[in-house]
Amino acid sequence: MPTPILHHFDLSPFAEKARLALGLKGLAWRSVEIPMIMPKPMLTGLTGGYRKTPVMQLGADIFCDTRRIVQALEQWQPVPTLFPTGDTGLGLALSHWSDTAFFEPGAGLSMGMNDELPEPLLADRKAFFEFMDFDRLDQEIPHLLTQLRAQASLVDRQLADGRDFVTGAAPGWADICAYFPLWMARGFLANAGEILAPFARLPDWEARVAVLGHGERETITAEQAWAEAREAEPLGEPRVDPDDPLGLSAGQRVSIAADDYGRDPVEGELLVLDVDEVVVLRETPELGRLAVHFPRMGYRVSAV
């Protein structure tokens, strides 16, 4: 397995999910710092238009969305596992819960209760966070607080029997999913301690998750990452589920876009399509052939 490259920025909550997964597995990885706001030409040159953070690169294979990244990491280095109780389906399902019900109120509060956000960042997020009504954000703060507290209480309740981690004695992806919205809240909300004070089991658990660390990180440039992509060839063979309801074929030109926000489409030739992932091949003059991987859940695939 080549050493992973993570395209990210340090303040990204979703990148923290990937960094903790790398830490749990004790992996060495390389870090490419990307801009917090558009344009991100070196990133979108790899992905074909996808702009969300983070993106993981393995040679000429580009992995978008933490849901796809975690499955790739688990496949290539099964031990230590991100699913210590064997509940892979449950752990992956919790990604959707944490990315929506838990993340979205925290993101709204981070936008609405922070007066120090730079105007370019605020303008970028207004265009990006389609689930937020920025014109009503001030009025929404009490509601968003109730939602953040409701989700935090679920984690606190799960720890009520004295267990060290969400699914038992060992840390896993379920902990990372539950942790990252709290990491965001404590990092971006000045009164996070007060908001989360009723949930007394959280701080010790959060400390145990944080100890996972981020693995062995080495900083490289985007140009170095591009050079590696240029010199590699995508891995994997065509594989399209014949029972897939879309009725698409390998080699057919398709477009892939997130169905929540950040819907920038990526086009390419269909390489893989099944219940877990969709992969397209892109041919670029600068980088040659690239395979761009997405999770199947949460993404809309259509023929071009």
Image (cartoon, rainbow, N blue to C red):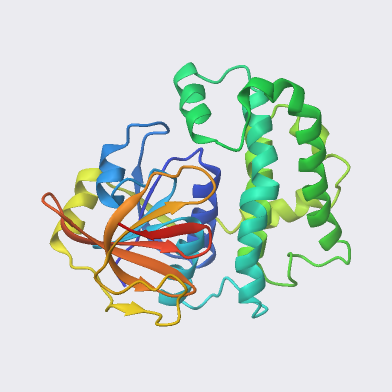
| Side (left or right) of 68 relative to 181 | left
Residue drawn at the location 54% of the way across and 47% of the way down: 260
* Image x and y of residue 202, in percent: 79, 50
Q: Residue at x 50, y 18 (%)?
A: 118
x%, y% of residue 66? 49, 57
Is 53 positioned to the left or the right of 227 in the image? right
Say whether residue 159 is visible. Answer: no
- Picture coordinates of residue 61, whole percent (x, y): 29, 63
Quadrant of residue 96 in the image?
Answer: bottom right
Quadrant (top left/top right/bottom left/bottom right) for the N terminus: bottom left
Query: Can you see residue 15?
Result: yes
Q: Residue at x 65, y 53 (%)?
A: 98
Q: Position of residue 302 (x, y in %)?
A: 38, 59
**Front position in the image: 264 or 101:** 264
User: Where 208 sits versus 121, above or below?
Assistant: below
Total label count?
0
Check the image and report above or below for 89 versus 132: below
Toward the viewer: 258 or 236?
258
Give the side of residue 226 with respect to residue 139, left or right.
Answer: left
